[in-house]
Amino acid sequence: MGFLEKHPKLAIATVVLIGLLLVVVSAELSLRFFGSLNIHYYTGHSKPGMHEYPYGTIPINSDGSPDEEFIPVASKKRIGYFGDSVTYGVGVGYGHRIPDLLQATFPAYQHWVFAQVGAVPQALEVSREITKHQLSTVVYLMNLNDILPDEQSPEVLGVTASELSKIATRTSFLGRADEALRGRSYLYTYVRLGLKNALQRAGYEAHGQLAYELRPKQHHRVVSQTAERVVKFSEALSSQGVKVCVILLPYEMQVSSDAALTYARLGFSWEEGFLEGSTQVALLQPLRQGGVNVYDAREAFSGLRLKVGEAFVYDKGDKIDWNHPNRFGHARIAAWLSGLPAFWQQCLPG
């Protein structure tokens, strides 16, 4: 009696497995050689002291910050820039970021970048950097997806704290798998793109968090909590004798009608009033009442008729990206800040 007759189920499973493997390998090779997706756009390649990306390089100094080595010049006061991947330089690279451009405009100061991808600055961590590096000014480039509920109030999410713990445990494995496959497997990256787009169309961020910023009226409590945290952040740092300034960064659809139409056609949506800046307005009033020096960077694009992708990344990598300005976008914001008298007076060290 042959193998097939003795083990028919095992034989069928083996044939099916081999067939699936051939399909996966074929798809991987086809996408690798004929696909248009740049799977390395956000992951890049790491080298000692540097990350290389398709759009440019980001140096990593001995402090772990995305900048050249921090070498103090006694005659120059220091400005520290904090934020997430926008401040880090995703989509632009070193030398083309807002802090780099302001360094060229205001060379009398040292402009140092402390940003981390995906991070929201915390007062205690920033306070340590102020003390360690004797910063005179802190500039927080605030991305709209920094709008998040307080950790102490998970009920805002509609789940309990124990449920959040279970979700975190389950997603930690997915995160490790994502790190292992993203930027390496073309098939995985294409599948990932489809899933991320589906998440964003359903009202979530690409990383799975609710996109509170797109619906500030619906999520007014979360917006209020975020504003309160930023006020406390500013008060805590100001108590150390430093100037604190917050720049509210826009999304592409808020500064380009062509982008808004493009994203709407792709199935993405937002609350009425968002395009006109309802999220920024909901933050500006409580922040200013709390004494925070805050600026709305939508103004940097005022009067421009921009095509989708002209000032923001849009579709260069493995996700639809409306929150990372490209080199043109960074240059516009830096030029706007440079020409803003209030920024000179309130943010530049005296």
Image: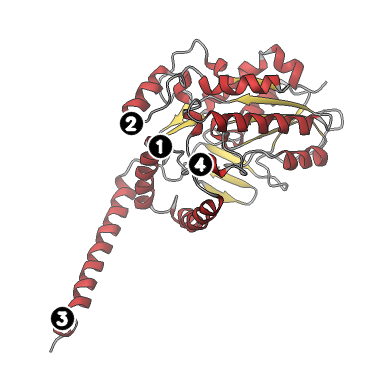
Looking at the rendering, in which quadrant would you find the N terminus?
Answer: bottom left
Q: Is residue 95 visible?
A: no
Mark 3 vs 1, N-terminal side: 3
x%, y% of residue 56? 54, 37
Q: Nearer the viewer, mark 4 or mark 1?
A: 4
Looking at the rendering, in which quadrant would you find the C terminus?
Answer: top right
Amino acid type of the residue that numbered disc 3 sits on in the rendered structure = Leu
Residue occupied by mark 2: 267
Q: Nearer the viewer, residue 9 or 228?
A: 228
Measure the alpha-carbon separation of dots 2 and 4.
24 Å
Amino acid type of the residue that numbered disc 1 sits on in the rendered structure = Gln
Disc marking residue 157: 4
- Say whether residue 275 is left or right of residue 79: left
Q: Nearer the viewer, mark 3 or mark 4?
A: 4
Mark 2 vs 1, N-terminal side: 1
Measure the alpha-carbon separation of dots 2 and 3.
50 Å
**Total numbered badges shown on the rendered structure:** 4
**Residue furthest right in the image:** 74
Measure the alpha-carbon separation of dots 4 and 1.
17 Å
Mark 3: few/some/many CA within 10 Å (<14, 14-19, 20+): few
x%, y% of residue 236? 77, 34
Measure the alpha-carbon separation of dots 2 and 1.
9 Å
Please tell me in which quadrant of the rendered image residue 261 appears: top left
Residue occupied by mark 1: 200
Q: What residue lies at 54% left-to-right and 32% top-to-bottom?
A: 92
Mark 3 vs 4, N-terminal side: 3
Mark 4 vs 1, N-terminal side: 4
